[in-house]
Image: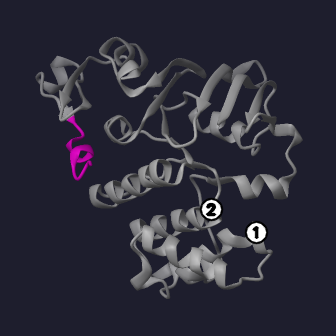
Amino acid sequence: MIKLTGLSKSYGQQFVVKDASALFPKGEVTSIIGPNGAGKSTLLSMASRLTESDAGEVLIADKPLSQWDSKDLAKRLAVLRQSNNINMRFSIRELVAFGRFPHTQGRLNEEDNRIIDEALAHLGISDIQHKYLDELSGGQRQMAFIAMVVAQNTDYIFLDEPLNNLDIRHSVDIMTTLRRLAHEFNKAVVIVIHDINFGSCYSDNIVAMKKGEVVASGKVHEVIQTSIMEAMYEIPFDIKEIDGHRICLYYGSPSITGERSRSCDGALANVS
């Protein structure tokens, strides 16, 4: 388990994250949700030591994050950031092989190649593994980067907005894969996500943030509630229970929308 206690980060007099606490259990998917500027990415970045916190503590497997050796940490925690720009020309398989670097320092053996093959299969890109990244669609590129994280084979996986610019099919494929990694392989998967219905349908836990603070944290049914969502996003919400999943219908000003709701129905597709 990863435990965050009292994390804070400020720039000048402005707090980006303030006194934030959360739990990321192994074997479960945790989604961090909230409006733009809520501090979601900064919280994840502090939890992975990519950004130094001003206050608070992060425990990974009961050991303070500050005490982890970088090489050992890379074998336990994998991070996929929002921006993944690679200037060199790599094939998908070459990119995914980078996930093994913390374990092999670039000297791949038979076991490493087996893990790479499994990661490619998990993301459904084995048949295009020899294509170059500049030949891929945005969805295929994102699948390749996630396969690299999967190949790192860590206990903890952090992904910052992995569904950005993806269509419904690729989003469903990715969320299904991440849930399998958590439930079948006992990994703690933590996602910063904007689509609250994907978060609701595919997560075990939700951490809700607003203006740098954690306003609610717990199981999906504890956090995906009308009062919490309306206070966080400052618009009307109507939450429906459909096939055991909490689906948010959210509305703009009646004068603008004519009381018509907008819902992310794609989050229901292929949920199992």
Residue 159 vs 136, above or below: the answer is above
**Amino acid at pointer 1:** His
Q: Residue at x 66, y 85 (%)?
A: 110
Residue 85 is situated, as x and y percent measured from the top left of the image, at: 61, 66
Image location (x, y in percent) of residue 90: 60, 82
Quarter of the image for residue 241 reads top left
Judging by the rendered image, the residue that carries numbered circle 1 is 103
Element under disc 2: loop
Q: Are marks 1 and 2 in contact (CB under 8 Å)?
A: yes
Amino acid type shown at disc 2: Asn
Q: Which mark is residue 159?
A: none
Q: Residue furthest bottom?
A: 130
In the image, residue 127 lies in the stretch drawn in magenta: no
Left or right of residue 122, residue 266 in this image: left
Name the residue at 28% across, 60% down: 169
Q: Which residue is mark 2?
A: 153
Q: Is residue 81 above or below residue 1?
A: below
Residue 85 vs residue 261: left or right? right
Where residue 220 sits: x, y (%)?
39, 27
Magenta-highlighted residues: 263-272
With respect to residue 164, does 231 lie above or below? Answer: above
